[in-house]
């Protein structure tokens, strides 16, 4: 993994850690221990007039991707079980933020806060959540949450199991390393200003970066870390030297979980379309990688016999 010199001072770094801890603590208290303080979307949190405005916007801006009944076409569904599962127990402000910052896909950022809130009202109406007397507004969005969805069913008996095809180093170099570097690259290039041109002469790798670029590439890199990092712990995984990967060790599980959480933080930051927010998360990413490398990788030399000391 890329080893970077932190961009901020130790004091700023400590302040960031405290702030992140405080945010996590507040979020946990709001959504769990003090869930009663949040209003549910079932309590009439929008008005019918607002939902009507949202419907007009939806027909003009969203229907092509999300469908006439919000069933999902090119984009994901905005109603039904899969939508409620994706937004389970999350504050409504997260949905409005996503609409405002990332939609429509080809014109991200073109909707105002009010328009995004009206669209959220229409989504609630389409999901059969009742209307009320007052409109949704910025002051209350963070105080309203979706209901908790039922947990996903366990995999059926006899379902195919995964078996590792590569060793731990190959997995990290092929998946973790390139996606982490996309996040690190936000330190030097603002994704909002990127619009690469077609490579001349033609190159498939460079051409690929002109198809999914900018914030979309950052989103996808963060999601790739979230989705792929659990593969570190796949039973039967081996290290480059053939020694079994430490998939059962408590510290290795903690390092893996920490990287997944950093991926989630990176995705949230990317969805804000704020480069500085992503840069702050890359410092956490650097630490998450370094903490594991100090124990299981450092002191060895890649591609040489020194790698025999890995995964002890």
Image (tube, helix red, strand yellow):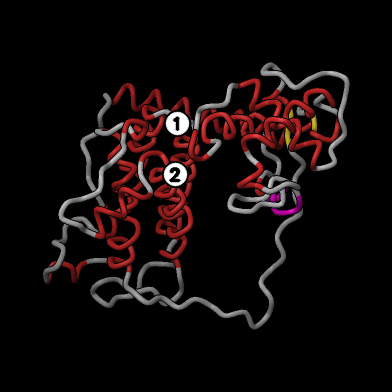
The residue singled out by tag 2 in the image is 219
Looking at this view, name the residue that lies furthest to the front: 60
**Image x and y of residue 72, in percent:** 66, 52
Is residue 294 found left or right of 244 in the rendered image? Answer: left
Residue located at (75% from left, 30% from top)? 121
Q: Is residue 55 above or below residue 226?
A: above
Residue located at (79% from left, 28% from top)? 52
Question: Can you tell which quarter of the image residue 142 is in?
Answer: top right
**Image x and y of residue 262, in percent:** 43, 44
Q: Which segment is the magenta one?
A: 80-85
The residue singled out by tag 1 in the image is 273
The crowding category of the residue bearing disc 1, from other C-alpha atoms within 10 Å (few below 14, some 14 to 19, many at least 20), is: many
**Image x and y of residue 130, in percent:** 87, 34
Quick check: is 77 in the magenta stretch?
no
Residue located at (25% from left, 60% from top)? 204
Question: Can you tell which quarter of the image residue 279 is in?
Answer: top left
Is residue 153 found left or right of 28 in the rendered image? Answer: right
Quick check: is 84 in the magenta stretch?
yes
Front residue of 25/62: it is 62
Whether residue 154 is visible to the viewer of this picture, yes or no, is: yes
Indicate the secondary structure of the residue bearing disc 2: helix
Q: Is residue 109 above or below residue 158?
A: above
Q: Is residue 95 above or below residue 254?
A: above
Majority SS type along the magenta span? helix
**Image x and y of residue 224, in percent:** 43, 54
Is residue 107 found left or right of 97 in the rendered image? Answer: left
Mark 1–mark 2 distance (CA, rounded to whole Å): 10 Å
Whether residue 312 is visible to the viewer of this picture, yes or no, is: no
Indicate the secondary structure of the residue bearing disc 1: loop
Are the residues flagged by discs 1 and 2 in contact, CB closer than 8 Å? no
Residue located at (68% from left, 26% from top)? 117
């Amino acid at each position: 993994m890329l080893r970077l010199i932190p961009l901020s001072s130790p004091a700023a770094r400590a302040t960031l850690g405290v702030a992140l801890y405080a945010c996590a603590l507040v979020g946990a208290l709001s959504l769990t221990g003090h869930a009663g303080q949040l209003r549910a979307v079932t309590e009439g949190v929008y008005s019918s007039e607002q939902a009507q405005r949202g419907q007009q916007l939806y027909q003009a801006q969203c229907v092509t991707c999300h469908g006439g009944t919000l069933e999902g076409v090119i984009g994901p569904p905005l109603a039904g079980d899969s939508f409620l599962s994706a937004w389970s127990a999350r504050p409504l402000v997260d949905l409005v933020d996503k609409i405002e910052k990332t939609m429509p896909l080809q014109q991200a950022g073109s909707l105002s806060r009010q328009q995004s809130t009206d669209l959220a009202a229409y989504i609630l109406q389409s999901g059969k959540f009742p209307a009320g007397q007052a409109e949704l507004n910025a002051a209350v969005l963070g105080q309203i949450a979706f209901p908790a969805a039922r947990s996903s069913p366990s995999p059926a008996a006899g379902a195919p199991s995964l078996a590792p095809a590569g060793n731990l180093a190959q997995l990290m170099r092929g998946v973790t390393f390139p996606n982490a570097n996309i996040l690190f690259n936000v330190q030097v290039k603002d994704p909002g200003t990127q619009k690469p041109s077609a490579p001349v002469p033609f190159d498939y790798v460079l051409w690929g970066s002109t198809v999914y670029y900018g914030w979309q590439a950052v989103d996808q890199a963060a999601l790739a870390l979230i989705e792929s990092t659990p593969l570190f712990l796949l039973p039967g995984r081996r290290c480059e030297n053939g020694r079994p990967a430490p998939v059962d060790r408590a510290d290795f599980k903690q390092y893996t979980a920490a990287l997944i959480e950093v991926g989630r933080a990176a995705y949230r930051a990317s969805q804000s379309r704020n480069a500085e927010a992503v840069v702050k998360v890359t410092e956490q990413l650097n630490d998450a990688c370094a903490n594991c490398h100090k124990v299981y990788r450092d002191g060895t030399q890649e591609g040489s016999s020194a790698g025999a000391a890995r995964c002890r």
